[in-house]
Amino acid sequence: MPLLEELISAYEERQRKLSISEGVINISPLAIDDWPDEFEECVQVFSLCILLNRTDLLKRFAKLVDDANYKGEDTLYEDLLRKRLPDREDVDEWYHDVYTPLIEAIYADEKAEASQLLADYCEQWYAAFSHAPWHDSHLNGDEGSYVGYWAIEAAAVAYLYDIDDSKVEHMVYPKALVDYARSHNPTLNQSKDT
């Protein structure tokens, strides 16, 4: 997990440099309200910290974004953090519509509905990010920066909210990562209560 530690340190350094260049003390390293792909990057970092059980790194990264006045502004943002960090906000709005099925999965009344919404989210995920700089990077061959397409936030939601993912077969869903998290932190309170 040293790479995850290095990633968080890189975001802290980016924030420091942006703060100097923009003259804004608590600037976010990512513009999560304006750019869906930067929001995606943010929730993926949250999700990696959660799934790899690195609450220490989650706190550090969340602080960078929280301090830029993003705390309490987006449902998915808060729902990912609330199971691990205290004093999160209860919000019923979100920045980007692409996340609607995933948010609905968290709040679904029936387990089967939550599972279907999780699958639906994964199904539409890649196409929803057609504007992202990484989209279609697999077409660039060895010269590109393709490292895979992963809806890591879907995995974190399934893990945190105990959603049955046994029928989610989409290639962007990192089921092995969810299995790892479940096997390495069986004491997590995974109730659907928020």
Image (tube, rainbow, N blue to C red):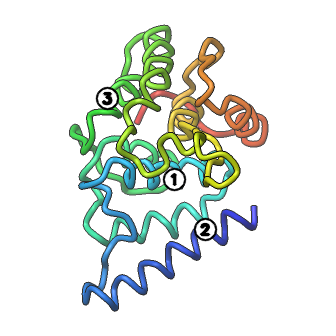
Residue 133 drawn above or below residue 190: below
Q: Residue at x 37, y 33 (%)?
A: 128
Q: Residue at x 43, y 52 (%)?
A: 133
User: Pointer 3: residues within 10 angstroms few (<14), some, or many (20+)?
Assistant: some
Q: Which residue is mark 1?
A: 46
* Picture coordinates of residue 160, whole percent (x, y): 55, 36
Q: Which residue is mark 2?
A: 7
* Picture coordinates of residue 144, whole percent (x, y): 61, 53
Three-letter amino acid code at the position of disc 3? Thr
Three-letter amino acid code at the position of disc 1? Phe
> Sequence-wise, which precedes: disc 2 or disc 3?
2
Looking at the rendered image, the disc whose residue lies closer to the viewer, 1 or 2, is 2
Q: Left or right of 108: which side holds 159?
A: right
The answer to whether mark 1 and mark 2 are in CB contact below 8 A is no
Indicate the secondary structure of the residue bearing disc 2. Answer: helix
Q: Left or right of 151: which side holds 90?
A: left
Residue 146 drawn above or below residue 71: above
